[in-house]
Amino acid sequence: MELLDLTGKIALITGGSRGIGKEIVKTYAAQGATVVIASRNLDDCNKVAHEITQEDGKAMALRCDMANLDDVTNMFKVIMDTFGKLDILVNNAGVSITKPSLEVTGENWDMQFDINIKGLFFACQEAAKIMKEQKQGKIINISSAGGIKTFKRIAPYGASKAAVIHLTKSLASEWARYGILVNGIAPGLISTDINTEQIGDEELLGKMLNMIPLRRLGQPSDIATMSLFLASDASNFITGQTICIDGGVTAE
């Protein structure tokens, strides 16, 4: 479909070396975008970039620790030095620590907030500096159903993801005048290599499925296709929204 074509677009996906991020990378590349894959592990990013180029796609790997603001700034400098523009930013990098709230340490808290919201905000800021001059751009922030609905043992994570939802609205309102559209996606329980152990536990999987009205886990492709829609011209009158893809979890 022509509206979903990303040919000629430069797209940066943080946390793009695995799981949902990797699926977004593959989806964008298949639609013609040049994808920049960023994460803390450069080797993993290079492997994904190689997969893309083997399929005649265009890709570049970058190392970036989203908790390190110098890394974040440098990432955008490299992109501008290489391509001279940035059309799409997907803030997918994130971290979750699961433990009872009574056991959460200051270090646990800081790690989740430094990556999930502080790093995300400054990535948005760096992207907006570029996109303002271009008078166009798309920013997509990956939040979580845990930022809307409470779940036990992930209180700091949920709070950080709720902050992402609010920040998405704030930036969308502030930057609309520059032609920058800012939206979010809130995934529910998605089957990825990150949660293979939990899915392999039949009892735990049963409890997870009982929480989901559709009675199945989501797939990375469920998130990637929505991300494609929000990155494409098909969504040019949508901004400030966070779309929940959770099989109905937050509807109850």
Image (tube, helix red, strand yellow):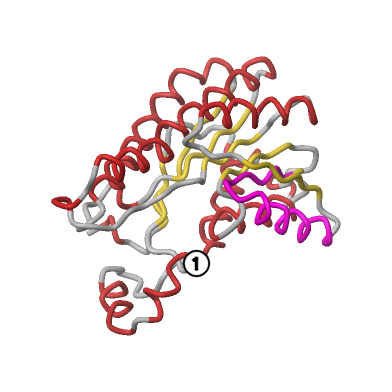
Which residues lie in the magenta part? 35-55
- Screen quadrant of the C terminus: bottom left
Nearer to me, 8 or 107: 107
What percent of the width, then of the height, locates residue 60? 75, 44
Farthest residue in the bottom direction?
202
Residue 74 in which image quadrant: top right
Is 156 situated left or right of 29 in this image?
A: left
Residue sitting at 33 percent across and 52 percent down?
A: 145
Residue 164 in which image quadrant: top left
Is 37 situated left or right of 56 in this image?
A: left
What percent of the width, then of the height, locates residue 223? 51, 56
Nearer to me, 185 or 155: 155
Identify the secondary structure beneath mark 1: loop
Residue sitting at 53 percent across and 62 percent down?
A: 220
- Mark 1, Cα crowd under 10 Å, few <14 / some 14-19 / many 20+, is some
What percent of the width, then of the height, locates residue 62? 68, 42
Which residue is denoted by mark 1 in the rendering? Answer: 192
| Residue type pointed to by label 1 | Thr
What percent of the width, then of the height, locates residue 41? 61, 51
Is 114 situated left or right of 13 in this image?
A: left
Q: Is residue 51 magenta?
A: yes
Principal secondary structure, stretch drawn in magenta: helix
